Image (tube, grey):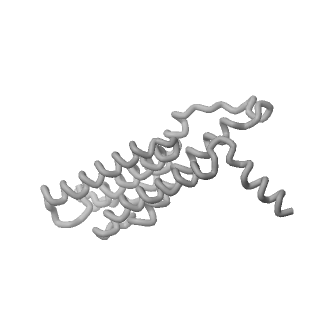
Amino acid sequence: MIDLIQQEFLSTFSATPLPVALTRLVCALIMGAILGFERERHGNSAGLRTHMLIATGACLFTLIAFDLIELPENEKSTLRFDPIRLIEAVTSGVAFLAAGSIITQGTKVAGLTTGAGMWMAGAVGLCCGIGNIPLAALATALTLVVLWMIRHIMPGDGTDSL
């Protein structure tokens, strides 16, 4: 019984070996945490946990897509894979979440930067999922530069507003 469970667990990593999948998921989690920490530190509604989950989820969806490509021939005769659809689906899902963080009161808009950070966490997760961790790290670093430097160059009232 244990052998059957072990075989089932290990055989599911046909497209992306377990150590590679784990590395990509952990990198997405860490980079999402870096982005989320900045938001959390400034008291924004979508912070550390939200950004971590978005980045990790986007990475997971990418890994799932790779597994779908590797289905046996008889199972994928009706499967159509378009990598752009994956990007569109993750982008739309994250945009839906990000829209929930945006609040308008008259002419004042709050949460827009947090929403953009959530969107960026999704993109970072996609990068990690395809294995382009250096690009994800570069995007994370540039995002932090934007969030930190602009806050000091153009200090506002301390809110996440436009």
Task: State left or right for residue 87 relative to residue 118.
Answer: right
| 129 is higher (above) or lower (below) than 35 | above
Residue furthest to the right in view is: 1
Q: Residue at x 82, y 63 (%)?
A: 2
Asked if one can make out residue 91 in the rendered structure from this viewpoint, the answer is no
Q: Quadrant of the N terminus?
A: bottom right
Task: Give the percent coordinates (x, y) of residue 83.
Answer: 55, 34
Asked if one can make out residue 160 in the rendered structure from this viewpoint, the answer is yes
Task: Give the percent coordinates (x, y) of residue 153.
Answer: 13, 56
Q: Residue at x 54, y 39 (%)?
A: 86
| 105 is higher (above) or lower (below) than 59 | below
Q: Residue at x 38, y 62 (%)?
A: 36
Q: Quadrant of the C terminus?
A: bottom left
Task: Give the percent coordinates (x, y) of residue 31.
Answer: 41, 56
Report the label total: 0
Task: State left or right for residue 87 relative to residue 35.
Answer: right
Residue 97 or residue 35, whichever sits in front: 35
Task: State left or right for residue 122 relative to residue 14.
Answer: left
| 2 is higher (above) or lower (below) than 139 | below
Q: Quadrant of residue 73?
A: top right
Q: Residue at x 35, y 51 (%)?
A: 140
Task: State left or right for residue 59 relative to residue 11.
Answer: left
